[in-house]
Structures are given as C-alpha cells and as structure tokens.
C-alpha cells in the first residue's frame, strides 16, 4: 500500500528513518554547494500507528547530528547517522535522544569511491544487520555496487562484503 501525507512546519526531510511508530526526518546535506532547508536535528513525526497522531510534527528530537546523507533505524532502539568518518558512526537513542559515537573497526565505504575513506556513507538496516553501500568498487567508479554487511550487536563485526553489478541500463545518474 502506498500513502502519503503533508507535515506542516517542517522545512526539509532528505534523510528519513522510521521505527514503525514514528518518522524521524532531517535535511539532506552533501557539501556546501547543496545546503537544503531544515536542520541537522531529527524531527519526530507521527505516523498514525501505535497511538501516534498521523501528520503531526512533534518537534526536534534529541541532540544535533552531523550533517549527512544517510541514517537508519535499527532494532536495538537507535538511529545510526553517518558522520562523514570512515571508522565511526553516530548513535542516537530513540528513548532518550542522547547521542554518542560507535567505532566501526573495519570502516565504512565512502558512497562515491567504494573505498573505506572519510566522506559520506550510505547505510540501511533490516533490523538484524546494517548494510553499507557504495556506487563504486575497488576496480573503479560507477561500475558496480559495493556492499558491506555489519553486525552492530557484535561490536560492528564485518560479516560479509560483496559486489553487485549495475542494472541492465547501467548507472543513470551523475
């Protein structure tokens, strides 16, 4: 089922995560040439599920995060926010709003280069693992998707890494 709704008094939501009850949204930020409306604080928005009021903006939630392009909710009750650093990630508690950092021993892939390096990273979670994806491989830019799979419940141990080829029509973005 697809659905949508308007959230009033919210300036930007390029980075959106959900814990199944709330949406948490903040602006998308890549570099100083792309300053989008909003802030680096997550805003909590009701989904209509679990006794929340759908479309309601409940305001700023938690401490400020680093400006970035990606975040994900994980079943351990935290929002993980990429911080532009290869070997650490920000962790925001959905219970308390407090933020800290977690070490990533094997490092995150930078989203453009496919290498472990400082810069923005793309992350997502299925509730069990956290996935880090880049649009390049060690063999070159934009020639495949590099994927790393981490277990945040086991000190962010790297479980697996693999390359997935581009779709039949290749990469269609610059």
Image: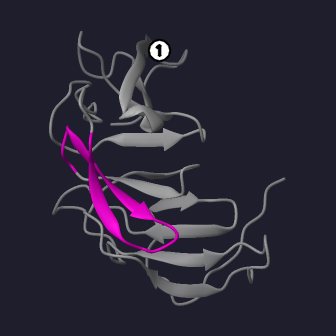
Query: In the displayed structure, would residue 19 be above or below residue 75?
Result: below
Answer above or below: position of 127 versus 145: below
- The residue range painted magenta reads 84-103
Is residue 98 found inside the magenta-colored segment of the image? Answer: yes
Q: How many marks?
A: 1
Q: Quadrant of residue 53?
A: bottom right
Q: How is the image coloured?
A: one colour
Q: Is residue 134 visible?
A: no
Which residue is the extreme one toward the right? 1
Q: Quadrant of residue 6?
A: bottom right
Nearer to us in this view, 99 or 115: 99
In this rendered view, identify the residue nearer to me: 94 or 12: 94
Q: Position of residue 3 (x, y in %)?
A: 78, 63
Residue at image position (69%, 60%) is 20
Residue depicted at 54% across the width and 77% down the height? 44
Residue 141: in sight, yes or no? yes
Residue drawn at (26%, 63%) of the image: 67
Left or right of 174: which side holds 44?
A: right
**Farthest front residue?**
154
> Quadrant location of the C terminus?
top left
Say whether residue 58 is magenta: no
Q: Position of residue 82 (x, y in %)?
A: 31, 50
Q: Is residue 14 above or below residue 130?
A: below
Question: Residue at label 1?
Answer: 164
Is residue 59 depicted above or below 27 in this figure? below
Q: Residue at x 38, y 41 (%)?
A: 122
- Residue nearest the observer in this picture, 165 or 64: 64
Q: Position of residue 157 (x, y in %)?
A: 37, 26
SS category of the residue bearing label 1: strand
Q: Residue furthest top?
A: 139
């Amino acid at each position: 089922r697809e659905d949508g709704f308007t959230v009033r008094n919210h300036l930007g939501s390029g980075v959106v995560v959900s814990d199944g009850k709330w949406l948490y949204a903040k602006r998308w930020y890549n570099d100083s040439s792309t300053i989008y409306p909003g802030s680096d604080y997550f805003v909590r928005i009701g989904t209509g599920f679990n006794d929340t009021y759908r479309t309601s903006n409940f305001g700023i939630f938690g401490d400020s995060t680093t400006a970035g392009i990606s975040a994900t909710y994980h079943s351990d009750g935290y929002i993980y926010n990429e911080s532009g650093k290869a070997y650490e990630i920000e962790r925001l508690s959905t219970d308390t709003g407090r933020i800290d950092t977690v070490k990533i021993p094997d490092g995150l892939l930078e989203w453009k280069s496919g290498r472990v390096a400082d810069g923005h990273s793309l992350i997502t979670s299925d509730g069990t693992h956290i996935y880090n994806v880049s649009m390049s491989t060690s063999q070159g830019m934009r020639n495949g998707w590099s994927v790393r799979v981490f277990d945040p419940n086991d000190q962010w141990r790297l479980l697996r890494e693999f390359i997935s080829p581009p779709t039949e029509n290749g990469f269609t973005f610059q």
